[in-house]
């Protein structure tokens, strides 16, 4: 299941480079250089950017973007996140999934009961997490996106199975208080 119009974060422009409009770019694609081959990238503001040339550097790439020819214009793009339409990407192989494909998927317990719906897949530095909204519960639940916690994903059914430890949802308050 791929949500229509789903967007995948492919990279970010980190800075302007030089005086001719080049930018420093960090790629998040599986093959970092492939970011230039997927076609136009879209910023969060809806601006379309196309990579004309890409060369590797120590912390990513230096990119020449179509229509960006001076430093002033390049400076306006600093921090711009670059997205692809999910449909621009090849289908994942084997047991791989695109994290964007998990948004909207129903999470069920090992016994098959509905647990909630995946609303985001954040990563705060220690690994990907599934943010799950439960029906009738204000706070969302974060679950590590790891095989121990998510043993099965069925994108055809738009469902994933959670295997949470029994005390996972406890609030951390000792029983005697």
Image (cartoon, rainbow, N blue to C red):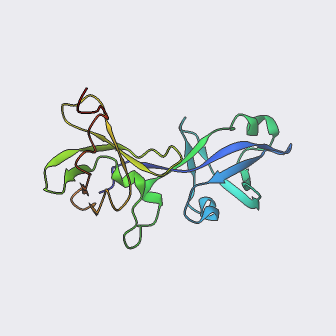
Residue sitting at the far right: 19
Residue sitting at the far bottom: 94
Q: Quadrant of the N terminus?
A: bottom left
Give left or right: position of 113 versus 174.
left
- Which residue is located at x 29 percent, y 46 percent? 104
* Total numbered labels placed on residues in the image: 0
Residue 121 x, y percent position in the rendering: 41, 46
Residue 49 x, y percent position in the rendering: 62, 47
Give left or right: position of 29 versus 24.
left
- Which residue is located at x 67 percent, y 54 percent? 51
Residue 138 x, y percent position in the rendering: 26, 28
Residue sitting at the far front: 176
Give left or right: position of 53 versus 33.
right
Q: Nearer the viewer, residue 40 or 57?
A: 57
- Which residue is located at x 81 percent, y 39 percent? 71
Q: Quadrant of the C terminus?
A: top left
Q: Nearer the viewer, residue 116 or 141?
A: 141
- Place residue 175 in its image quadrant: top left
Q: Nearer the viewer, residue 29 or 169?
A: 169
- Which residue is located at x 75 percent, y 40 percent? 74
Give left or right: position of 59 versus 169.
right
């Amino acid at each position: 299941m791929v949500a229509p119009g789903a967007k995948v974060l492919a990279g970010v422009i980190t800075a302007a480079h030089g005086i001719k409009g080049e930018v420093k770019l960090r790629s998040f694609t599986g093959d970092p250089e492939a970011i230039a081959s997927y076609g136009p990238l879209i910023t969060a503001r809806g601006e379309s950017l196309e990579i004309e040339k890409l060369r590797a550097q120590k912390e990513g790439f230096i990119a020449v973007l179509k229509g960006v020819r001076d430093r002033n214009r390049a400076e306006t793009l600093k921090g711009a996140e670059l997205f692809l339409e999910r449909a621009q990407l090849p289908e994942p192989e084997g047991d791989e999934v695109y994290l964007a494909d998990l948004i909207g998927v129903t999470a069920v317990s090992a016994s098959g009961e509905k647990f909630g719906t995946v609303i985001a897949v954040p990563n705060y530095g220690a690994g990907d997490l599934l943010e799950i909204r439960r029906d009738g519960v204000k706070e969302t639940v974060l679950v590590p996106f790891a095989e121990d916690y998510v043993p099965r994903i069925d994108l055809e059914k738009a469902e994933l199975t959670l295997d949470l430890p029994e005390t996972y949802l406890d609030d951390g308050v000792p029983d005697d208080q």
